[in-house]
Image (spheres, helix red, strand yellow):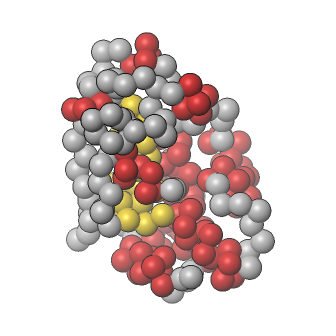
Amino acid sequence: MSKVKVIDCESTGLLPHPIHGHPQVIELAEISLSGYAPRDLLAFDSWETFPIEVRKFFPSMPIHPEATKIHGYEEKDLVGFPSSESLIYDLPDITIGHNISYDLRCLNEKGASSICTMTLFKKLNKNMQLGLENCKADYLVEKFFPEEAKTLIKQQHNASDDCLKVILLLKKITQLCPKIFTWREMQELQQKLK
């Protein structure tokens, strides 16, 4: 059975760390989808079905003010948490997220096998003429899941809510692509679509 996770990171910003060469993670949320297939998501009425593991970290570099505007964290909020440099990410067979390449870069896992809901929506919008104005997670959740959006979309982002948005977006992708039965098939569709 494949090990599959939805993840989201909040980080120190877009600026790289002088030693590690990537921003540092200050919050990591993970939802395991191991044992589930894409079509299983259609049976769930609530996006709150899946338990979320959230870990916070204290960075060894300053949090950029623009990043703080997005997630609200300042260094003082993270005092007492383990160091960002101590983060060990248990790489699954497939990692899923919205703009997942950024999260994987923060985790220093650039070559990981992944599914990106943002990339899939961009490609599906082009191939199926969905008429999307953009493929940002908040916009997509508001468009396809207006009731859930009232709870999930807030002034400031957090990694756990962003993971739940990805679960909803995976559900919509599965509805749009009825021939997708496995995560590998979804990954292949992402690679195949232009």
Q: Nearer the viewer, residue 34 or 25?
A: 25
113 relative to 18, above or below: below
Residue at left offset 62%, top offset 69%: 122
Q: How many marks?
A: 0
Displayed quadrant of residue 143: bottom right
Which quadrant is the C terminus positioned in?
A: bottom right
Residue 61 coordinates in the image, percent (x, y): 37, 25
Q: Nearer the viewer, residue 162 or 74?
A: 74
**Can residue 81 be seen?**
yes
Displayed quadrant of residue 55: top left
Residue 71 coordinates in the image, percent (x, y): 55, 31
Residue at left offset 44%, top offset 32%: 12
Residue 47 coordinates in the image, percent (x, y): 53, 52
127 relative to 66, above or below: below
Residue at left offset 28%, top offset 39%: 20
**Can residue 51 be seen?**
no
Displayed quadrant of residue 128: bottom right
164 relative to 40, above or below: above
Which quadrant is the N terminus positioned in?
A: bottom left
Residue at left offset 36%, top offset 60%: 95
Q: Nearer the viewer, residue 101 or 50?
A: 101
Left or right: where does residue 151 sit relative to residue 48?
right
109 relative to 86, above or below: below
Residue 67 coordinates in the image, percent (x, y): 54, 32
